[in-house]
Structures are given as structure tokens and as C-alpha cells.
């Protein structure tokens, strides 16, 4: 099969992904083999390729927003049949027995594996996943448009939940990439007012087109005090600006898996019971709840499509804020 293989981490400008022919994988007993049609490109992929996340498998095939059809199944697979359309998310497998798994917090599992990081992912014509960790894709979403739902969508949704935002509330988005452009649609559905704080003019326009009440620079104070904020950008220096924009008792949720260091925080910014919390991975429940809601709203994803062989270029565009909405690889 054709695949984009990461042999050693490097800045994306050096094109570290090799487009190669490699043997196709075979499913183990509880796995499905998926013929990949589309794979979303996520900032986490950039962190994997550039080594901001320490390598866990090498070489590795990145990609964790995978859409495709089940090609074949392992001997213990019962629910899915060949031909079923499925999505494979970041949360690849959990242990099911650690204290977090038993407490319904499998996103924090001690032994979790992750698609496109500790297990090969979807920048390839075929990939594997455990049956219990793949989702049916709701009808009505073409494969390419469904791909960004699987991480940008699910993690954005979990971030909204953890921000504690309520209907009618005022919510700040710091950064307006793939996750924010999906999350704003959920927020609007909940009658939440969204303020987009981001450095890129194209992202200002997209936010306003999608129903933000205001768009401005990262450090500009929004015209209303915020009940909550979500920082999508991987930049710790944004945290003080977001705290400054919050009402008393408000929460800043940090949606990224990696962030540059946060500068020293004057205690005034945090006082009055403001909360900073990170968002880590997702549970299967988040994925199921989000995909149901995505079909109900329905969510529309803005996508820029790249051929699989141009994964380096897609990641380079993402790094330079040059994607409107989400980048997606068309695999076959
Ligand atoms: Zn566990
Ligand atoms: Zn992701």
C-alpha cells in the first residue's frame, strides 16, 4: 500500500514524511482493517512529525481522523461487517482496567494507545483499529467532510463541555483553526455568543462568517467579559490574555496536546476563582455524543483537500495558518 511514513522527526519544512510503498497490515482478532478514503490533518500530527511529542513508535504512519470502509475483520469482531463506513479517532485503545478506565475517565488511561502516534494511523491506504474504538459515520457527511469531525470535532466538543459554558453565555476562542470552526457551530446551536481572538485576518473573516459576534487580535480585550474561553492555539503566552478577559469564576480550557510555556501569572488574573484546565484526549462517549449532535445540527466542515502524497505540504500550510477550516488528505 501507499503510505506517508515518518522515519525520524524533523521540522516540517524539511518534509520528514516519505511517500512509500509498504506492506499492508493484517487485522488481529479484535481489529478491523479499514480501506482509508480520507484522513484529516491535525495540529497534533504536526507535533508528532516535528517531535514536540516524544516519539513512541518509529517509524510511524501519522493521522488520526480516519474515514474509510471496513475491508476485513479479525476473528473476534462481531459488530462490524465488511463494507461498513467507519471513523477512527485519536483514542486508539485503552486498558479497561486502570483506575481511570474504571472511573469513566478512559481519556486519562495509564496504558492508552493513540492512532498515528503509538499505533500506525491514516496517512495510508489501509490501517487497523480495534472494533470497539471505531465509530459509524452518520449518513449525510461525505467522507472528506466527515474526517475533521473525528478529532477537531470531538476534542472541540470536549473542550466546550469542560469550559462549563452555558446557553446564552459569552465564550472566547483563542485561535480559529479546524477545531474552532467546528466548535463554533456547536456553540451557536447552544445559543452561546462566540468571540474569536486570533492573529490571522483570514481566520477573523471565517469566524465572523460562521457567526462570531466579534473577531479581533489575540491580545485585544473582547467587547464583553467572557464566561469561559478555549485556547486552541499551542501558545502559552495567550493564557494571561484569556484570563484577563474572563469574568469572576470563569474557566479557560486549553484544548491542545502541546503548548509552549505559560509566562508567570500575576495572581490577580487567577483570583476570584478563575480556573485553568487542560483537555486531554477523548472518551468514546464524547465521540458518540458529538457525532450524534453533528448529524442533528448538522455541522458543516470547511475543508481544503490535498492528495495523500502531499501530506508534508498540508502540514506546512497548517503550521503557517494557511488553511481555511480543516485540511484533509484524499487517500483513494
Ligand atoms: Zn486504562
Ligand atoms: Zn487531533
Image (cartoon, helix red, strand yellow):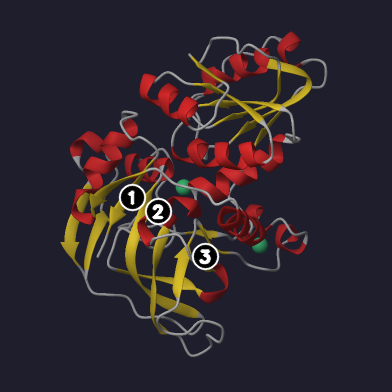
Residue 56 screen position, x and y as percent: 42, 54
Residue 30 screen position, x and y as percent: 51, 81
Residue 201 screen position, x and y as percent: 38, 19
Q: In the picture provided, is 27 more to the left or to the right than 222?
A: left
Residue 259 screen position, x and y as percent: 50, 30
**Crowd rating for badge 2 (residues with CA inside 10 Å; few <14, some 14–19, many 20+):** many
- Residue behind mark 3: 138
Give the number of the disc on residue 122.
none
User: Which of the 4 image quadrants contains residue 273?
Assistant: top right
Q: Are marks 3 and 1 in contact (CB under 8 Å)?
A: no
Quadrant of the snapshot with the C terminus:
bottom left
Q: CA distance from mark 2 to mark 3?
A: 11 Å
Q: CA distance from mark 3 to mark 1?
A: 18 Å
Of helix, strand and loop, which one carries label 2?
helix
Q: Are marks 2 and 3 in contact (CB under 8 Å)?
A: no
- In percent of the image, x 39 and y 21: which residue is there? 200
Give the number of the disc on residue 145.
2
First reached walking from the N terminus: tag 2 or tag 3: 3
Comparing 188 with 254, the one in front is 188
Q: In the picture provided, is 267 more to the left or to the right than 303?
A: right
Of helix, strand and loop, which one carries label 3?
loop
- In percent of the image, x 66 and y 12: which residue is there? 244
- Residue behind mark 1: 328
- In percent of the image, x 74 and y 59: which residue is there? 104
Nearer the observer: mark 3 or 1; the answer is 3
First reached walking from the N terminus: tag 1 or tag 2: 2
Q: Ligand 2 within 8 A of label 2's CB?
A: no
- In percent of the image, x 79 and y 15: which residue is there? 271
Of helix, strand and loop, which one carries label 1?
strand
Quadrant of the snapshot with the N terminus:
bottom left
First reached walking from the N terminus: tag 3 or tag 1: 3
Amino acid at each position: 500500500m501507499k503510505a506517508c511514513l515518518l522515519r525520524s522527526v524533523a521540522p516540517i519544512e524539511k518534509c520528514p514524511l516519505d511517500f512509500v510503498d509498504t506492506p499492508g497490515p493484517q487485522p488481529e482478532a479484535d481489529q478491523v482493517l479499514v480501506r482509508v478514503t480520507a484522513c484529516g490533518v491535525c495540529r497534533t500530527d504536526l507535533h508528532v512529525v516535528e517531535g514536540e511529542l516524544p516519539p513512541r513508535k518509529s517509524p510511524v504512519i501519522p493521522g488520526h481522523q480516519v474515514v474509510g470502509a471496513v475491508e476485513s475483520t479479525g476473528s473476534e469482531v462481531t459488530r462490524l461487517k465488511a463494507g461498513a463506513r467507519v471513523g477512527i479517532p485519536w483514542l486508539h485503545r485503552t486498558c479497561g482496567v486502570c483506575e481511570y478506565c474504571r472511573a469513566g475517565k478512559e481519556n486519562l488511561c495509564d496504558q492508552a494507545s493513540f492512532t498515528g502516534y503509538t499505533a500506525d494511523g491514516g496517512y495510508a491506504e489501509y490501517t487497523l483499529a480495534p472494533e470497539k474504538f471505531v465509530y459509524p459515520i452518520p449518513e449525510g457527511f461525505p467522507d472528506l467532510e466527515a474526517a475533521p469531525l473525528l478529532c477537531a470535532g470531538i476534542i472541540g466538543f470536549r473542550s466546550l463541555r469542560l469550559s462549563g459554558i452555558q446557553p446564552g453565555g459569552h465564550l472566547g476562542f483563542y485561535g480559529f483553526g479546524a477545531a474552532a470552526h467546528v466548535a463554533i457551530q456547536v456553540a451557536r446551536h447552544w445559543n452561546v455568543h462566540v468571540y474569536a481572538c486570533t492573529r490571522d485576518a483570514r481566520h477573523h473573516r471565517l469566524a465572523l462568517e460562521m457567526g462570531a459576534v466579534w473577531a479581533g487580535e489575540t491580545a485585544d480585550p473582547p467587547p464583553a467579559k467572557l464566561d469561559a474561553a478555549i485556547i486552541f492555539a499551542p501558545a502559552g503566552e495567550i493564557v494571561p490574555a484569556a484570563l484577563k478577559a474572563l469574568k469572576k469564576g470563569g474557566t479557560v480550557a486549553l484544548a491542545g496536546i502541546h503548548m509552549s510555556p505559560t509566562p508567570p501569572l500575576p495572581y490577580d488574573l487567577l483570583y476570584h476563582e478563575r480556573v485553568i484546565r487542560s483537555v486531554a484526549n477523548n472518551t468514546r462517549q464524547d465521540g458518540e455524543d458529538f457525532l450524534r449532535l453533528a448529524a442533528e445540527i448538522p455541522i458543516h466542515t470547511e475543508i481544503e483537500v490535498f492528495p495523500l502524497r502531499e501530506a508534508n505540504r498540508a502540514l506546512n500550510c497548517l503550521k503557517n495558518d494557511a488553511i481555511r477550516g480543516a485540511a484533509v488528505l484524499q487517500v483513494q
